[in-house]
Image: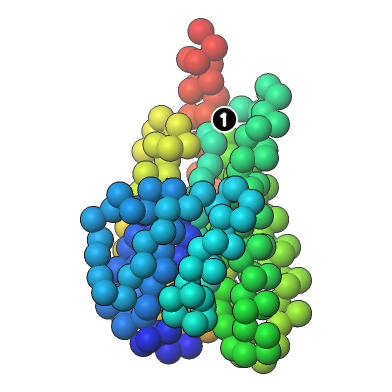
Amino acid sequence: MTLNKRVVLVSGASRGIGYALVKRLLDEGAVVVACARTMCETSIAHERLTKIDADVAVDGELDRVFNEAIMRHGTVDAFVANAGFAYYERLNEPTTSHIDDIFHVNVHHVIRGAARMKQVKGEEPFNVMVTSSGVAFVQTPGYALYSATKAALEGFIGSYRHELARGQVIQAVYPIATETAFFDRANQPHRPWPVQSADRVAKAMVRGLKKNKKRIYPLPLFPIGRVLTPWFFTWYVRREKKRFDTHHSIKRR
Ligand SMILES: NC(=O)c1ccc[n+]([C@@H]2O[C@H](COP(=O)([O-])OP(=O)(O)OC[C@H]3O[C@@H](n4cnc5c(N)ncnc54)[C@H](OP(=O)(O)O)[C@@H]3O)[C@@H](O)[C@H]2O)c1
């Protein structure tokens, strides 16, 4: 798709990957509607940017953002479902509220937004881009719930693709660890490695949108490495398990 003058709705845009993406979309000439719970607290401003505070975990909030975008600009050409978070935790206590909370944000809002795009556009072309994660393929300790949400998105994207008309595209982005507030918010005590910048991911997302790519790997070595150097991922997961076990044995003391 061309981005110039296209209306792009981005969720989870107040910081990190979403924030970097908004900046790049504006540079490309897109009309951007950006939402997050603290979107209006951000300093970013532009005549083609609308900022909306919305909690996408709450029923009706994403619809409100879509309605506002349609009222202002007449349509939405692309929805980037980027809002998401993780818990770094051991699943040995009842965590029903964690299960509900993470699925509402990481999965439900994505599906609702994708369905809403179909409603808005009918048979016309549109793009839905979903920020998935490398954990959809390489599951690391401490992220069981998070990995479950990203794996659920794989199933949704793979099947929903078959319902779409010509020119309607659903795309998945697979970042590896990225330098954002994500890990602090998840309560992971150690810094991740290797990491890439949020802007690198945003750049790959913009390229992916323009080329209508189904799968976007901001670090192209990631899918190649999974095939050619599986031992690296085995070593990586083992190392993360040691860190996870140490963290939780310290917490128990
Ligand atoms: N960082 C990584 O290593 C990494 C790797 C792979 C995939 N990802 C994925 O990339 C996406 C963006 O993460 P990030 O790294 O940029 O993390 P981040 O810096 O923590 O940003 C998360 C964004 O999501 C928003 N958000 C969270 N809960 C929300 C809610 N209930 N309603 C509306 N917005 C909400 C946050 O805004 P508010 O707090 O203002 O609501 C924020 O704008 C996520 O889907 C994440 O799973 C991240």
> Residue 31: in sight, yes or no?
yes
Of 248 and 12, which appears nearest the observer? 12
Question: What's the residue at 43%, 76% (across, down)?
Answer: 72
User: Which is nearer the eye, 244 or 10?
Assistant: 10
Does the numbered disc 1 mark a residue whose Cβ is under 8 Å from ligand 1? no
The secondary element bearing badge 1 is classed as loop
Instruction: Classify residue 13 as left or right of residue 26.
Output: right
Residue 144: tell me if it is visible.
Answer: no
x then y, percent, for residue 182: 42, 44
Indicate the amino acid at tag 1: Glu
Residue situated in front as seen by the camera: 214 or 156: 156
Q: Is residue 137 left or right of residue 10?
A: right
Identified at 44% across, 80% down, the residue is 73
- Indicate the position of residue 118 as horizontal and vertical percent values: 67, 78
- The spot of residue 67 in percent (x, y) is 54, 69
Q: Where does the image place residue 209, in percent across and percent down from the top left?
A: 47, 79
User: Is 80 on the left-hand or right-hand side of 178?
Assistant: right
* Mark 1 surroundings within 10 Å by alpha-carbon count, few (fewer than 14), some (14 through 19), many (20 or more): some
Task: Tell me the residue that label 1 is attached to.
Answer: 89
- Snapshot quadrant of residue 129: bottom right
Outermost residue on the top side: it is: 253
Q: Is residue 225 above or below residue 206?
A: above
> Which residue ends up furthest to the front in the rendered image?
71
Residue at x-position 51% and y-position 49%: 55
| Identity of the residue drawn at 44% across and 48% down | 37
